[in-house]
Image (tube, helix red, strand yellow):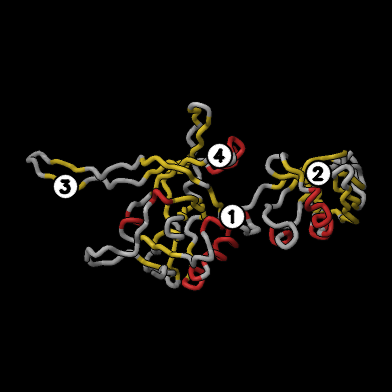
Amino acid sequence: MATYTGLITCNTANGNTGIPQCSFDWTTIEYFMLVPKNYMMTQTEIQTAFATLQAKAYNSTESLRGYVIGKFIGFEDKSTETTIDTDGYGGVSLGTDGKFHWVFEYKNGGMNYDILLNTFKNAQDAYDVIFFDKGANAIVGTTPSSNTSGYVFKGLSLELLYMPLPKKEANKVRHYIGIQLADSDELLKDMAYYVLPNSQKVGKIVSLRNMELQPHTNFTTTSGKLRVTADGGAVSLGPSYGTALAALHANWSIVRNDTGAAIAITSITYTAATDSFNFVNASIAAGIEITITTPTVAQMTSTVPGFGNASIVLTTA
């Protein structure tokens, strides 16, 4: 049987009860993506959802970037039920709507990943969430309101975003991230569900890894050396990307923090023996605080793909 590919809007007004194609089951959520609040997709963008969301994850501007989180290996359902109110005569009516509240367990990354995810703690007002359903190879969100003309898909609004403490059980440590949706009707009434082609797996949409700059020698008034690493300094990027990063020297920057003036970079070379990037720059007085910044994500994508840009603050010696 052929797999349906396309956008399914599940907000049908009538209550016909034939089994629909919106067969979302949150036990098959393998990843989710945090996207900037009120980020929406047009019909054209949803038809190329894989490329659209991968580009979102690689956006050069952090405030516009999406962040894929997972891989999840389990979850706990902590959702609340809709309350039922009883009046003085014994009559009943619906009270407060229940809220979807899920705690997802992930395995890879350990405490280092916990530290990264903790930067999103309590940031529910800044992000919406798009679920990646591995069972159907689909993305799950909600249908935008009628006053958002031209848009057909939006992330789900969040009310909570938090990281429960890791727990040690037997000989392993379990790691978690928790969310609560702000409006259950975004799923129960207005769910939008897009099935990707079989050749484009939702689990292959990936986030950027952190890049870090570390001093190798002091920066003097005209030169200095840095190391470029990833994953909190655990991995050196020099052996794999030294030549490529040095070749992008025109896209690096050095700025004086006191005046904001740019300092010209004459050259950057990579030395494998010391695993260092050697900067030669226009003269700066000693004792000046400077910020050195890598090329942007877009500038690095073709030769140093998959990393966020980085900066470091130093004082010239």
Give the CA separation, mark 4 to mark 3: 40 Å
Q: What element carries label 1?
A: loop
Q: Name the residue under label 2.
A: 227
Quadrant (top left/top right/bottom left/bottom right) for the N terminus: bottom left
Q: Which of marks 4 and 1 is nearer the N terminus?
A: 4
Q: In this view, does 150 lie above or below 128?
A: below
Please provide percent x and percent y for residue 148.
42, 68
> Mark 2: which amino acid?
Arg
The residue labelled by disc 1 is 206
Dot 2 or dot 1, earlier in sequence: 1
- Between the C-alphas of marks 3 and 1, the distance is 46 Å
| CA distance for labels 2 and 3 | 65 Å
Residue at image coords 67%, 47%: 210
Q: Say few, some or many: other residues with alpha carbon within 10 Å of mark 1 (under 14 / 14 to 19 / 20 or more).
A: many
Mark 4 or mark 3, earlier in chain: 3
For the residue marked with disc 3, what is the amino acid? Ser
Position of residue 278 relative to residue 147, above or below, is: above
Disc 2 to disc 1, how far (Cα)? 25 Å
- Provide the residue designation for mark 3: 93
Dot 4 surroundings within 10 Å: few (below 14), some, or many (20 or more)? Answer: some
Distance, label 4 to label 1, CA atoms, is 19 Å
The residue labelled by disc 4 is 118
Q: Is residue 84 left or right of residue 3?
A: left
Q: Nearer the viewer, residue 252 or 272?
A: 272
* Sequence order check, earlier mark of 2 and 4: 4
